Every structure is written in C-alpha cells, then in structure tokens.
Amino acid sequence: MKTEAIKQQIISNYRQLSDIARVRRVDPNKFPAWGISYKDKGVSGFVNQIGVVERNGAKIRINGDEVELKHKAFFSTWKRTLNNINKMLQSTIENIENQDVVKKKIVNILCFSKEAAEKLQKAARH
C-alpha cells in the first residue's frame, strides 16, 4: 500500500476512534479531554484528542486532513512506521472494550468565564 493511502487510512481510523472516545461535557466550567493508552504484545501506544499518535517512540500528529510526520526510528522507513501506526489504531478500535489492552483516560480542564478571566487578569496586574 502506498504512503498516501496509509495516511488516509490513519486519518479514517483516528476519526473513528475519536468518535468512540468522545466524552460528553457535564460541567460547563470544565472541558473534558480524552487520551487512549494501548499496550499489547510488546507494542505500546498513545492517542489523544489533539491528534498526537505515538507508537513505540514513533510519533505523528493529525491536523485536519493532514498527517504531520514528527519522529520515527532511525533504521525504519516512514512507510513502515505509518503502516505500524495504522495497525495499532485498527487494533485499538477492535479492542476498545478490553481494559487489559486499551485504557481510556479523561482529563478535565477548568475553564473560566470571560468575566472571571478579566477579574483574574486585573488581580494579576495589581
């Protein structure tokens, strides 16, 4: 499979995983962000809401419809690295319910209203 086809498959798998992992916002003052850890048969990986995908030290970032190549093993090609990342994403989707392989993590980020942010800025100036 060609590199561009693998990239498109990675984007498709990431979007599918993103739909599965999406968290409902319960508190209007908190923004939930998700992350998924994967560990199976010597392969460890991480996928998060901002598009970062890691697998055994290799790293890419999904930005809209683009795959940004960040880091790969020195003796590996990008084609092999992307193919391995794609396989990990597919396995993550298949094993999403298996707590031994896939662990879903949620971080709540506290958000301030505009008025509260202005009060904090005013207090910081004084």
Image (cartoon, helix red, strand yellow):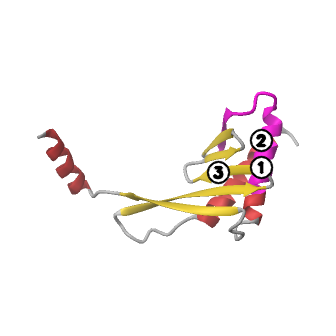
Amino acid type at mark 3 = Phe
Q: How far apart are labels 2 and 1 at the CA level?
A: 6 Å
Q: Residues within 10 Å of mark 3 (few under 14, many from 20)?
A: many
Which span of residues is magenta-colored?
65-90
The relative height of residue 110 versus residue 74 in the rendered view (above or below) is: below
Considering the numbered disc 2 on the image, is that residue within a helix, a strand or a loop? helix
Considering the numbered disc 1 on the image, is that residue within a helix, a strand or a loop? helix
Q: Nearer the viewer, mark 1 or mark 3?
A: 3
- Residue 115, how many percent across, how many down? 21, 56
- Is disc 2 in contact with disc 1, using a CB cutoff of under 8 Å? yes
Amino acid type at mark 2 = Leu
Residue at 76 percent of width and 27 percent of height: 74
Can you tell which mark lies on residue 46?
3
Q: Quadrant of residue 36?
A: bottom right
Can you tell which mark lies on residue 65?
none
Is 27 situated left or right of 95 in this image?
Answer: left
- Is disc 1 in contact with disc 3, using a CB cutoff of under 8 Å? no
Residue 32 is a magenta residue:
no
Amino acid type at mark 1 = Asn
